[in-house]
Image: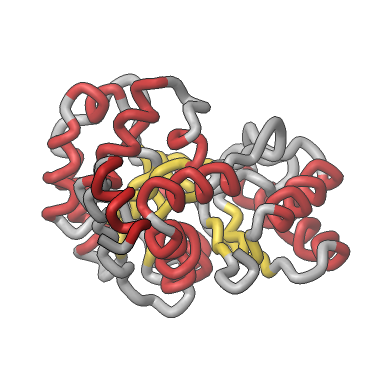
Amino acid sequence: MEDNPKLDFHNHVIPGVDDGAPTIEASLTALAVMKAQGIRHVIASPHLRASAVARQDDPDGYFEHVNTAWQRLVDASKSVADVAIYRGFEILLDVPAINLSDPTLRLAGSKFVLVEFGFSTIPPHSADALFQIKMQNCVPILAHPERYADVQERASQVLDWLRVGAYLQANAGSFTGHYGPAARRTAWLLLKVGALSYVCSDYHAMGKCHSASAYAAIARRYGPEIARLLFSENPMRILKNEAPVPVKAPPRKGFLEWLRARLGK
């Protein structure tokens, strides 16, 4: 994996701003953990509600708090060699429209925007909300679709999102069963049918980071090139404002086909 450094754009490593790293020490430990798993580029993405942006004010001082904590992370992260850090947000679309003219709302100042829906239920006209992002010449990346109950029950739900030009990012832990069997089954299904473009850690600077184990699991099932596209190639393309390469997992061979291939028959 060293030849294909990963970029992780969904994580919570800015200290003391959300349910991720509580302290700068935890932030630095998280970066070291991610580095050990082959991640060399980190776009920090603390939680943000679209409604807070829509109000065009900061009554609770959240943005100021994030800005201050971000600068602390930048200064302290120099102690973690060979890891480049950038900023962004994971934006909860709790209102149907958001002004994305501020580049700090986007991933590393690119045209790509990480968004999510609430877990209780996907809102009606969810594709319209994603299309509104496209209308601003931005590109929505929808976080962890495999964890939504609506998608677990009817995976075809994602077709509407893909049709309006959104891309899908699965959590690494979903492939290893960290979020339960339904999320695991749905993640593998979305990969199998070619609906996923990215896999990120969603690491909250505590517990286990599942990036390396998910990379290995995907490489075992579909080959290292598929894993490389999901964890390295496509995420790195964000920094260049380039669309992801389509990821179509090859059909899995049965045992007899595998044995014949190994024997050269």
The image position of residue 176, as x and y in percent, is: 49, 33
Quadrant where the image shows the N terminus: bottom right
Residue nearest the observer in this picture, 62 or 41: 41
The image position of residue 114, as x and y in percent, is: 41, 52
Q: Going 72% across and 66% down the picture, which residue do you hit?
A: 83
Q: Going 67% across and 34% down the picture, which residue do you hit?
A: 208
**Left or right of 229: which side holds 195?**
left
Residue nearest the observer in this picture, 211 or 138: 211
How is this picture coloured?
A: secondary structure
Considering every residue shown, the one lying at the far bottom of the view is 240
* Residue 210 position by quadrant: top right
- Disc tally is 0
- Whether residue 222 is visible here, answered yes or no, is yes
**Left or right of 198: which side holds 167?**
left
Q: Going 60% across and 54% down the picture, which residue do you hit?
A: 44
Quadrant where the image shows the C terminus: bottom left
The image position of residue 228, as x and y in percent, is: 46, 63
Q: Against 32, is 80 above or below?
A: below
Residue nearest the observer in this picture, 221 or 229: 221
Residue nearest the observer in this picture, 253 or 158: 253
- Whether residue 106 is visible here, answered yes or no, is no
Q: Against 11, is 174 above or below?
A: above
Q: Going 44% across and 40% down the picture, which residue do you hit?
A: 49
Q: Against 210, is 164 above or below?
A: below
The image position of residue 70, as x and y in percent, is: 71, 57
